[in-house]
Image: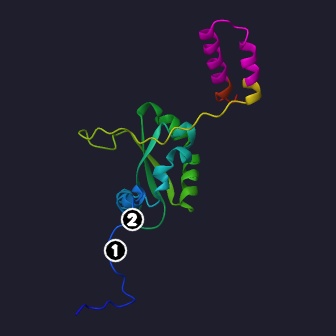
């Protein structure tokens, strides 16, 4: 005689979902546990570090851990920094604290400590975590058409192609803002 289950009891999943499961769903719990073991309650701090730190600091730093004090608020975020970039990152710490606290939604981080040691042991050579590369902006179609029109009289196809590539690169490059 089969036993009946209580209607309010949660039954364990008997089978997996049909078809493929997203990798994020399979690894979600493991990633959360691994992140929380280093103090990262908000995974966005790790996954969107390039957006949080900005283009000036993101390539120079990497979050290593968040350590909370025994009493009260005011955690310490530890960042891995190359020795040559330490002074530059040190000057930008107040702005970085504000950006990180914006991710948490409250003043969770009161201090940022910089470390120059490796985040892994000597035997664990790892490639640093880097986000997806940003796509290049599309050039202005009017300016691009004008540049290609000026290249039409050039007879050599290789030279015309090289100059067209140069024009496209110039039209899509980022301009540096000049100081005051």
- Tell me where the magenta segment starts and ends, as one range: 145-170
Q: Please tell me the numbered disc located at residue 18.
A: 2
Image position of 25 with respect to 140: above or below: below
* Callouts 1 and 2 close, C-beta under 8 Å: no
On the rendered image, what quadrant is the C terminus found in?
Answer: top right
Looking at the image, which is closer to me, 88 or 22? 22
Label 2: which secondary element = loop
Q: Which residue is mark 1?
A: 13
Disc 1 packing (10 Å; few <14; some 14–19; many ≥20): few
Q: Nearer the viewer, residue 70 or 17?
A: 17
Residue depicted at x 35% and y 57%:
34
**Of the numbered discs in the image, which one, if any, rests on residue 144?**
none
> Looking at this rendering, what residue extends furthest in the top direction?
155
In this rendering, position of residue 94 left or right of residue 19: right
Which residue occupies 58% across, 56% down?
A: 102
Give the color scheme: rainbow, by chain, secondary structure or one colour.
rainbow
Characterize the magenta stretch by its predominant secondary structure: helix
Q: Quadrant of residue 12?
A: bottom left
Dot 1 or dot 2: first in sequence order is 1
Task: Reply above or below: 122 against 74.
Answer: above
Is residue 125 found left or right of 28 in the rendered image?
Answer: left
Q: Of residues 25 and 152, which is closer to you in this image?
A: 152
- Categorize mark 2 by other alpha carbons within 10 Å: few (<14), some (14-19), many (20+): few
Q: Secondary structure at mark 1?
A: loop
């Amino acid at each position: 005689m089969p036993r009946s289950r209580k209607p309010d009891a949660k039954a364990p999943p008997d089978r997996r979902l049909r078809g493929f499961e997203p990798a994020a769903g399979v690894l979600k719990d493991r990633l959360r546990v691994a992140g929380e073991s280093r103090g990262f309650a908000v995974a966005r701090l790790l996954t969107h570090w390039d957006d949080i730190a900005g283009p000036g600091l993101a390539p120079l730093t990497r979050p290593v851990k968040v350590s909370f004090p025994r009493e009260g608020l005011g955690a310490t975020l530890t960042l891995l920094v190359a020795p040559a970039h330490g002074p530059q990152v040190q000057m930008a710490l107040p702005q970085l604290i504000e950006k990180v606290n914006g991710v948490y939604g409250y003043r969770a981080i009161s201090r940022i400590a910089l470390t120059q040691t490796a985040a892994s042991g000597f035997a664990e050579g790892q490639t640093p975590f880097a986000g997806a590369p940003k796509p290049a902006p599309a050039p202005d179609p009017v300016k691009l058409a004008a540049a290609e029109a000026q290249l039409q009289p050039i007879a050599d196809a290789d030279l015309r192609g090289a100059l067209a590539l140069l024009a496209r690169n110039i039209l899509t490059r980022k301009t540096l803002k000049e100081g005051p």
